[in-house]
Structure formats: C-alpha cells, structure tokens
Amino acid sequence: MIPILRSLWAIYCYIMIAIVVIPTSIIVFISTFLFKNNAKTFNLFMCLKVSSPLIMLLSGIWVRVRGKSNLEPNKGYVIISNHQSYMDIFANPTSIPRHNIFTFLAKSELGKTPFFGIIAKNLGVLVNRKSMESRKKSYIYMKKVLENGFSIFVYPEGTRNKSNDALLPFYDGAFKLAKDMNVPIVVNTLVGMKKRNNINRFLDMSPGVLDSYIEKPIETENKSVQELKEICIDLMKKRLQA
C-alpha cells in the first residue's frame, strides 16, 4: 500500500479506535463506580475479549494465532510479548484465548491518557519505574492477581521498540515475579506488526495479516532470572527472524 493510502487508512483506524474505546471507558468507569472490585472480571473480559478483537477487525488486521492450545483454561501465567507498535495493546488480547483473563503492567503515563487512562487505572497495574515505592506496590499487587488465578501481561522491553533490532534489552521484573510466584512464563510473539503499523512513520497503518505465536509455558523452577530471560529472548528472536 502506498504511503498516502496508509496514512488515510491510519486516520480511519484511529477513528474506529475512538469509537470503540470511548464507550468502553465509560462502561468501565460506571461499572467500577457501582460495583467496585466485583466489576473487574466483567470489565477485563469486555476490554480484552470484546473491544480489542473488534478494534483489530475494524482496522482490517487479521490476527492469525498459533499455539492457543498451549494455555490451560483459568490458569495464571506471566505472559510476555515483544512491543513494536501502538496496535500491540489490541493484538495481544486478541491472541490470548477467551478463557485466559489477564491484567497488564503499564507505565504510569498511560493513566493520564484520555479515555485509555480510565481503563488503565481501573484494570491495569500502573508503575512509575523511577519510583521504588511505586515499583514495590505494583509488585505486591501483581502477586495478589496471580494468587487469584488471573494472569499478568508484561512487555519486558518496557517501551515500544523503534529500532532496527529484533528486541530491546529485557527488564528483570516479569521473570522475578514468575519465579517468586512459581508460575510459568508464556511467550506471545507478534510477527509482522511493523508492516501493519510502523510507529517510525507519521500516520501509518495497513490492513492485512498479523501472525501471533503462543509458545508452550516455561516452568520457572530451578532456573535463574537470567536463564529465563535468555530462553524467552531466544524464542522471540527465532519467530521474528524466521
């Protein structure tokens, strides 16, 4: 698709995202106000399993998922993925089976974003990486989430990868959490996202296929944080370079 058409498609996609996200954030706000924590499972399901797939559908991006059967229903995992695009936050939930609900770790700045901020504050775990107190609080909260049978979703690169490298260096947090809680790590690699949404270009989006791979869970027992990182990086790079 030529650049001008990609830009026009991007404008259309952002309009579609707004049409879905604005009412979703209003529903999240109202249901949380009325039912407090009792509304969390419903809100997560709506955002992850209804709104995100709808956004991908309206954007013309077909997420072709391989490995869904690797995830057991209603089991808690630490799920990690590569991060190359604005659309990742919709593509990853679309990839994960309906019976696996997760909350996500995100930068505190996301909480200040209009409408997205409402969803992030009520459903995600916002952390200020520069604040040790914020990091400790988020870590304790994520432990409670895993204890309740939910999964935690993390982008271990910490930010979107705008470089030409396959991956940015990984932070330790997700791997320490998985070890401390003795829960498996699941790698979900998105392949081809830059063809769909290249964040190094202004207003860039294109319909088409996006491949998503869910690997078999990696047990954390008897493995160091560094070993776990190396295993996950190797799995992602093999998918990205294939």
Image: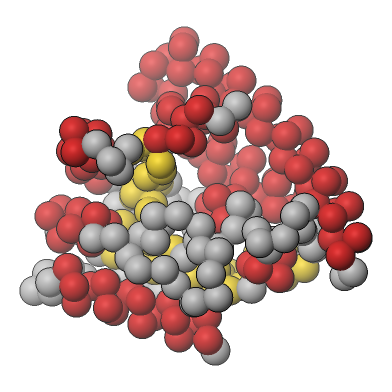
Q: Residue at x 54, y 89 (%)?
A: 242
Furthest toward the bottom, the residue is 242
Residue 202: image quadrant is bottom right
Q: Is residue 226 visible?
A: yes
Above or below, 15 relative to 38: below
Q: Is residue 210 visible?
A: no
Q: Quadrant of the N terminus?
A: bottom right
Above or below, 242 relative to 231: below
Q: What percent of the width, then of the height, locates residue 139? A: 21, 42
Q: What percent of the width, then of the height, locates residue 27? A: 59, 21
Above or below, 8 relative to 216: above
Furthest toward the left, the residue is 222
Q: Is residue 38 left or right of residue 184?
A: right
Q: Is residue 125 left or right of residue 12?
A: left
Q: Residue at x 8, y 74 (%)?
A: 222
Residue 30: image quadrant is top right
Q: Residue at x 36, y 82 (%)?
A: 234
Above or below, 46 relative to 101: above
Residue 236: image quadrant is bottom left
Q: What percent of the width, then of the height, locates residue 215? A: 41, 74
| Closest to the observer, 167 or 209 | 167
